[in-house]
Image (cartoon, rainbow, N blue to C red):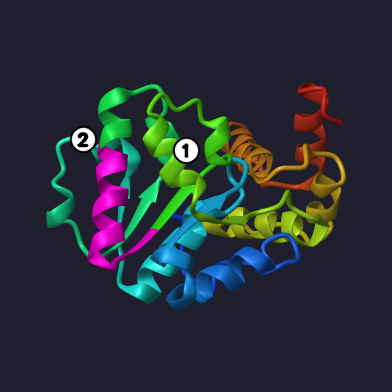
Amino acid sequence: MTFDLGAAEDFSRAGFFASPANAEAQAVLADWAHWPQNRLLLTGPEGAGKTHLAHIWAQEAGATLLMAAALPGLDPTSLPPRLVVEEADAVAGRPAHEEALFHLLNHQAHSGGHLLLTARRAPRDWGLGLPDLLSRLQSLAIARLDAPDDALLSAVLVKLFADRQIAVAPNLIPYLAARMDRSIAAARALVAALDARALALGRPVTRALAAELLDSTGNG
């Protein structure tokens, strides 16, 4: 019998791979004492590393993390002075959530705390219905995570396999990187699919198994 026990994600600084694709964003987060208005919006595609960087900043700045979906009903004055709000773009089109984020931004501006927001896109592309919120968000400094380069994509594959405690041959990583979609989200899905197939067949994760999987999904 085989059991898929999932993967334990490592959100430490040691587990984050630096590359030209994320170097600028890393530098901006590290210099958080000089953020304009003590606020920053971190943007990037799904799986680009926003959550990982947010955890690193929270650990080093002593900040609290929460999801934007949890904002309604929270009293901004009761929240810690240093805060991360993940998936801030998820408030768009939800009046109670937009208003809650608007009040949080207003409170933070007067309290002098530090606020980090993460989102996939710039605020103008969220589809917000509250004009005042859009105005507040467009005044934020933005740090962007670019699409992964070859070095980053390869390092992410190594990390994802390690998170699942899977040892793979070195030649598997460049083989996958050359054939997969160029995104970290695709890397995560591919590693999960390989792990599931290996468990189902009772075989190790090898280049041969990867070739079978890629061929069966039309990605070879």
Kindly identify the residue that appears in the image at 52 percent across and 39 percent down.
123
Q: Is residue 5 visible?
A: no
Predominant secondary structure in magenta?
helix
Return the residue at label 2: 72
Label 1 amino acid? Thr
The image quadrant of residue 216 is top right
Name the residue nearer the viewer: 67 or 212: 67
Question: Would you identify the image quadrant in which residue 171 lies?
Answer: bottom right
Q: Position of residue 108 (x, y in %)?
A: 28, 58
Q: Nearer the viewer, mark 1 or mark 2?
A: 2
Q: Name the residue located 82 percent from the left edge and 36 percent from the top edge.
A: 211
Residue that numbered label 1 is attached to: 2
The amino acid sitting under disc 2 is Pro
Horizontal and vertical percent position of residue 50: 53, 53
The stretch of residues the image draws in magenta is 100-115
Residue drawn at the location 14% of the way across and 55% of the way down: 77
**130 vs 189, nearest the viewer:** 130
Disc 1 packing (10 Å; few <14; some 14–19; many ≥20):
few
Q: Quadrant of the N terminus?
A: top left
Q: Is residue 17 visible?
A: yes
How far apart are labels 1 and 2 at the CA level? 42 Å
In-image side of 81 versus 73 (left or right)? right
Q: Nearer the viewer, residue 59 or 40?
A: 40
